[in-house]
Amino acid sequence: EKEKEKEKEKEEKDEKKEKKKEKKEEKKKEKEEETKKYKEKEKKKEKGTNKKNKKEEKNQSKAKGNDREKPAVTLEEFLKRATPLMVTIGRNKFTATPMMFSSGSYGWSHSGSLLADKEGPKYKVPCSVTLNITVKGSKPDTPRAFGTGTDFF
């Protein structure tokens, strides 16, 4: 009899645990549905206002003309951390060096020549390469004097 009672108690406990689990899962599903509905509402709101905002932003940027995005790295940080970049075009490898351009923006630059393979190695075409990789937003608001680009290395 004691064993039967223990089994009943165990079954009851298991049933309680199962019910708790089911309730938790239901609550979780309800929260997920609420969250989903909320996000959908927010997206709808954004879509409505986004169209208006985009038009306003375009008009404002045209009017101002000098709004620029800020660089991810300042000139000082760039000067401290920039290292030469290895660049590959086709089978040709070369190094672009960090520099500040005459416009005041900064990034990497390479200028030189290479032989481009056309239809395999038997037919090579001599080419001139000028490559400027500019850090987005690095151009200053006030222009620099012409010809003041600086190689850092």
Image: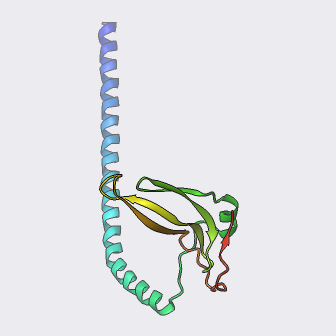
The foreground one among 58 and 73 is: 73
Place of residue 94 in the rendered image (x, y in percent of width and height, measured from the top left): 53, 57
x and y percent of residue 19 in the render? Answer: 30, 34
Question: Seen in the image, is 106 located left or right of residue 62?
Answer: right
Q: Quadrant of residue 143?
A: bottom right
View extreme (front): residue? 122
The image shows residue 144, relative to residue 22, as above or below, that is below
Which residue lies at the image location 64% right of the left edge and 60% below the top edge?
Answer: 82
Residue 17 located left or right of residue 78: left
Name the residue located 30 percent from the left edge and 37 percent from the top edge: 22
Q: Nearer the viewer, residue 75 or 16?
A: 75
Q: Look at the picture and state if 135 lies above or below 22.
A: below
- Say how the picture is coloured: rainbow
Toward the viewer: 76 or 34? Answer: 76
Q: Quadrant of residue 35?
A: bottom left
Residue 104 coordinates in the image, percent (x, y)? 63, 78
Task: Name the foreground residue: 69 vs 117.
Answer: 117
Residue at 32% across / 74% down in the picture?
Answer: 47
Please state the total of marks drawn on the protein image.
Answer: 0
Q: On the rendered image, what quadrant is the C terminus found in?
A: bottom right
Q: Tell me the quadrant of the picture where the N terminus can be found.
A: top left
Residue 38 vs residue 113: left or right? Answer: left
Q: Give the image location of residue 27, x and y in percent.
A: 33, 46
Residue extending furthest bottom? 63
Tell me what residue is drawn at x 30 percent, y 64 percent: 40
Position of residue 30 relative to residue 12, above or below, is below
